[in-house]
Each structure stands twice: as structure tokens, then as C-alpha cells.
Image (cartoon, helix red, strand yellow):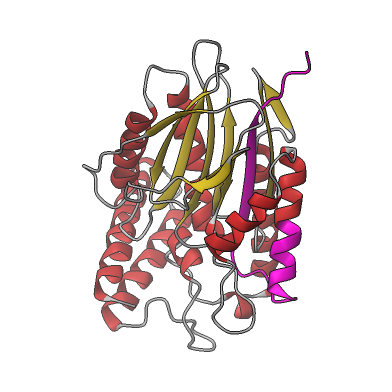
């Protein structure tokens, strides 16, 4: 573990100790608070001794996502006591239920648009963010996909943070570059330096006008009858620098045109060796899928992704979403 990381954990532990001490003054029976303060002091001592983040049973590093969520833990998952293991499993099950409840309706349709997505965590919970936000006219609809650095519970907590931030901003008067800039500042102020997120947001109107802003995320792909092209990213990931600004790319989508979003669990998926699925293969696939419904396009992508991996395990969270401007039935 690098020295800068020790500093992050130490600051979090000292803040926790201050809060516990404040609570201890106010609570008459403080035995439990005293125990919690002792746990924090023990973690601070392990930082001083260079033993922080090392399992006391096997002496291997403890999982980083668990340390981020609870910096006083002393054992890796493999060496938890049975009662602690059951409690962790219960917590993960509850976290997954909460995360699933935050996902948008699928399939989705409204105001001349239709969407379909697949959300496949690599573990019990996911660091991918996916949402569809619809407000009353004249506000545009917002389609969002993001990816939080890291995995596990810590990443899923930041996903929930993104969900609440964008839900609170989408109904206002903010243009999407402003929304990303505000979310970036909030992340910088409320997370540790090692936590950041990539994200792409598209604002779509019933007229077919679309505006896309990208914070370091995988480039979405625009599928038209005349061709397929990627919309490159120009912004930095959110949570790295507080003063980051974002721009946007505006264009018109015709009936039948589709925007395809995804996380790097798709394009960085690998089979034997170093070969990755990649953007070129995705574009070639979407070329063959022009005219498909969103559901058929997503399904074809996942079939090709699975075929490419040739049985290799899924190592990263995966989210894909296709958003199509509806075709008039008149």
C-alpha cells in the first residue's frame, strides 16, 4: 500500500474517532462506544506499525473495497469468523437488492423513444451506474451510464451517490455539461482521492434532438441507416479535479437511429492471451445490427461478447444500453 493511501485511511479513521468521542460525551452508557474507539485506535496503530490492511490470519492484503467501506477490519474474507461471514453475506444480499431497486424500468419507452439495457455485475454488487430519468416537458429525458473505479461494496455506494445526484439535478435548468461539472465537484468534496467515476449522459427531446456529454467514459456509438460511428470522449473522469469543466456534442437523431452505451466490461473483456473485445469489433457488430430493436441489438451484442470470451470468466461489471428514436407507425 502506498504512503498516500495510508494518509487517506488515517484521515478517515481520525474523523471517525472524533465523532465517536463526541457521541461518548453525550451518551451515559458508553461501553459500546469505548469498544468502537478502541477499534479505531487499533487501526491507527496498525498504520503506524505498517501492518494496516494486512490480514492477521494469512498475512495477505485485505480486499481494498472492504477497507474503504470499513477501515477497522482485520481479516480478509477467507478468514472471517463464521458469524462475521454470515453477516457480510447478509449485507451483500441487502446491498444487491437496494442496487437492483434503483435500476430503471426495462424495457422502457416514452415521448417517442425506446430503450433496453442489461446490467450484469461480476459479483454480488456492481460499480456500474445505469439510469433513465424522465421529467415533465419541456425537460429532456436523460440516459446515463457510468463506471466507478474499483469493485464491491465501496464502488456500489458511490453508484448510489451518483444516482441521487443526477436524479436531483435532472429536473432543473442545468444543461448536461453543468450537471457533470456539479457532480464532479460534489464527488471531489465527498469522496477519497482514489475514488472517481467515468460517465456519459445523453439528453434527448421528443423532437429527436440529442446532446451528449462524456466524462472519460467509453465512447457511445451512434447507429444510423447510413453508417455507424463512435462519439469520442473529451472530458476527464469525475472526482479527480474539482475545477474540471465539460463540453457536449449535439446532433439530430432520425426515427430508427440508435445510441448504444456500454461500460468497459464489454470492450475490455479478454479471452486467452491479451486480446480484448475492443471498440472495432463492437462497431462491426452494430453495423450488422442496423434496423434492430433495442432489445435485439443488446441481445446480439451479449451473444457476441460471450462467444468472444470462449468460456473465460466475467472479470468486470457489464452494462449495455440501446436507446432508439421510435419509428412512426402511422
In the depicted view, which residue is nearer to us: 197 or 124? Answer: 197
Q: Is residue 315 above or below residue 297?
A: below
- 169 displayed left or right of 136: left
Q: Is residue 255 above or below residue 66?
A: above
Which image quarter holds the N terminus? bottom left
Residues in magenta, as a range: 302-330
Nearer to the camera, 1 or 249: 249
Q: What residue lies at 66% left-to-right and 34% top-to-bottom?
A: 104
Instruction: Please state the horizontal and vertical placement of residue 241, each as a whole percent of the image.
Output: 24, 49
Q: Is residue 55 magenta?
A: no
Write the residue at 47% across / 58% down: 69
Quadrant containing the C terminus is top right
Is residue 303 rendered magenta in the image?
Answer: yes
Dividing the picture into quadrants, the one containing residue 127 is bottom right
Residue 191, above or below 179: below
Nearest the viewer among 291 and 97 is: 291
Which residue: 36% across, 82% down?
51
Q: List the single residue furthest toward the left.
A: 243
- Could you say which quadrant of the image residue 3 lies in? bottom left
- Residue 73: x percent and y percent? 48, 69
| Residue 267 falls left or right of residue 112 | left
Residue drawn at point x = 64 percent, y = 50 percent: 287
Q: Is residue 317 visible?
A: no
Q: Residue furthest front?
A: 226
Q: Residue furthest top?
A: 137
Residue 54 image offset from top left, x and y in percent: 44, 81
> Does the image show residue 180?
yes
Q: So how many labels did they put on this image?
A: 0
Amino acid at each position: 500500500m502506498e504512503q498516500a493511501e495510508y494518509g487517506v485511511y488515517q484521515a478517515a479513521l481520525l474523523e471517525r474517532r472524533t465523532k465517536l468521542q463526541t457521541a461518548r460525551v453525550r451518551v451515559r452508557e458508553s461501553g459500546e462506544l469505548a469498544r468502537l474507539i478502541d477499534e479505531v485506535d487499533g487501526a491507527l496503530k496498525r498504520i503506524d506499525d505498517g501492518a494496516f490492511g494486512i490480514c492477521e490470519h494469512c498475512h495477505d492484503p485485505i480486499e481494498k473495497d472492504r477497507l474503504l467501506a470499513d477501515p477497522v477490519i482485520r481479516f480478509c474474507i477467507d478468514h472471517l469468523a463464521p458469524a462475521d461471514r454470515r453477516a457480510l453475506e447478509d449485507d451483500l444480499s441487502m446491498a444487491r437488492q437496494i442496487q437492483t431497486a434503483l435500476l430503471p424500468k426495462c424495457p422502457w419507452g416514452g415521448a417517442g423513444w425506446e430503450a433496453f439495457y442489461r446490467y450484469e455485475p461480476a459479483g454480488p454488487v456492481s460499480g456500474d451506474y445505469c439510469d433513465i430519468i424522465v421529467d415533465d416537458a419541456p425537460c429532456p429525458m436523460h440516459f446515463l451510464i457510468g463506471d466507478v473505479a474499483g469493485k464491491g461494496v465501496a464502488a456500489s455506494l458511490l453508484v448510489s451517490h451518483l444516482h441521487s445526484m443526477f436524479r436531483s439535478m435532472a429536473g432543473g435548468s442545468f444543461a448536461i455539461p453543468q450537471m457533470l461539472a456539479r457532480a464532479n465537484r460534489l464527488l471531489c468534496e465527498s469522496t477519497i482521492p482514489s475514488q472517481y467515476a467515468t460517465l456519459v449522459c445523453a439528453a434527448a427531446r421528443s423532437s429527436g434532438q440529442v446532446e451528449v456529454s462524456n466524462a472519460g467514459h467509453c465512447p457511445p456509438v451512434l447507429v444510423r441507416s447510413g453508417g455507424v460511428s463512435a462519439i469520442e470522449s473529451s472530458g476527464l473522469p469525475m472526482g479527480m479535479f474539482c475545477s474540471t469543466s465539460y463540453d457536449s456534442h449535439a446532433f439530430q437523431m432520425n426515427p430508427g437511429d440508435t445510441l448504444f452505451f456500454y461500460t468497459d466490461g464489454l470492450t475490455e473483456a479478454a479471452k486467452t492471451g491479451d486480446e480484448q473485445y475492443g471498440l472495432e469489433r463492437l462497431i462491426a457488430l452494430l453495423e450488422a445490427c442496423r434496423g434492430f430493436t433495442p432489445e435485439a441489438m443488446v441481445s446480439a451484442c451479449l451473444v457476441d461478447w460471450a462467444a468472444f470470451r470462449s468460456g473465460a470468466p466475467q472479470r468486470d461489471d457489464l452494462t449495455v444500453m440501446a436507446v432508439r428514436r421510435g419509428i412512426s407507425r402511422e
